[in-house]
Image (cartoon, rainbow, N blue to C red):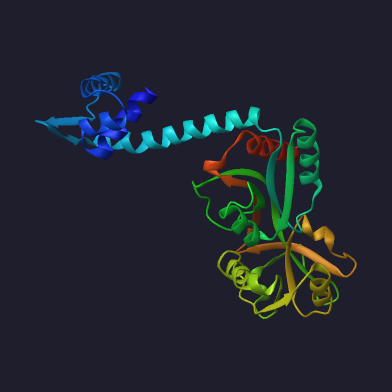
Amino acid sequence: MFQQMQYFISIVKNHSFTQAAAECHISQSAISQQMKELESKLGVKLLERKGRSFEITEAGQYFYTHSQDVLASVDQLVDNTVKIIKDDQVELKVGYLRNFGTTEFLRTVSKFSKDFPQVKINITSGNHEELYKLLKNNQIDMNFSDQRRALSNEYVNEFLTDSKFMLAISRDDFPDVGTRMDISELADIPCVLIADNDQRVADESYYREILGVRSEFVLAHNYDEAQILVASNQGYLIVNDRTQNQLNSEIVKTVELVNGKQQMIQNYYAYWKADNSGYYVESFAELLKESFHK
């Protein structure tokens, strides 16, 4: 059927049996017969013949659009299969989220390197925006990061884990606070943002639109600087129940972050472009997923 799909695409694209036959190096009678057989297999009319011309049916338009997707997937499958055998040295470029913690990621790298010694792993760390740009521009094959955008069909989105959002506040200045705080209670206190200057706008937008932060922002370049600001009551820091371990619990207190009594959750995914879904990318993602469920 794949060959017949190619014939059909050529007919519709050229809007001509004659030109399609020439393009596919087949006789016009033969390509017409192939179309009759294809319609017979499907049990629907793809083309309505009108003398020497034709009109594509609704079913034909659907089949035309999705046949191209199917054939593109087949081509990619063939290329990736051949690549596994032909390449003596394959490079897999992977990005991971800075400040998340490396336990699961390092475990995955170690296991993958043992299973696929012929593959060279090139690792890049960064924040969400940096990794997103690298993936979008094909500078990395796969990205392990937090979710800040709506999931897109352009990418394969493999869920890995989630974490509770937490607030880091001064232990001395909030002695009586309970185990959770609503983000609205902190509107008059600055929010400490760990970001480079060129990432500040994107991060501030995420904090306001997604997390509901109403505070002014004060910039810190790393966790040590952010912790000093929190300890001196110059602001609060949003972390999660994984990254809170980087803070000094004797000075900084962490409580659960809620918004309207709803616990806020941060999701983490492995992302890669759907048109770059090869054997090694999928294998690394599967090992990474297993690592989070041990």
Whole-percent x, y for residue 200 in the image: 64, 72
Give the left or right position of residue 294, taking residue 5 as reference: right
Q: Residue at x 65, y 62 (%)?
A: 258
Q: Is residue 9 above or below residue 222?
A: above
Q: Which residue is at the far left? A: 51
Give the left or right position of residue 3, taking residue 246 as reference: left
Answer with the quarter of the image where residue 278 lies. top right
Whole-percent x, y for residue 154 in the image: 50, 47
Front residue (pair 264, 90): 90
Front residue (pair 270, 294): 270
Q: Is residue 107 visible?
A: yes
Whole-percent x, y for residue 117 in the image: 77, 33
Q: Quadrant of the C terminus?
A: top right
Q: Residue at x 24, y 30 (%)?
A: 46
Front residue (pair 208, 164): 208
Q: Quadrant of the N terminus?
A: top left
Q: Is residue 175 visible?
A: no
Answer with the quarter of the image where residue 276 lies. top right
Give the left or right position of residue 40, taking residue 265 as reference: left
Front residue (pair 139, 261): 139
Whole-percent x, y for residue 100 in the image: 75, 55
Answer with the quarter of the image where residue 290 lies. top right
Numbered disc total:
0
Q: Which residue is at the far right? A: 250
Give the left or right position of residue 17, taking residue 209 as reference: left
Q: Residue at x 57, y 55 (%)?
A: 137
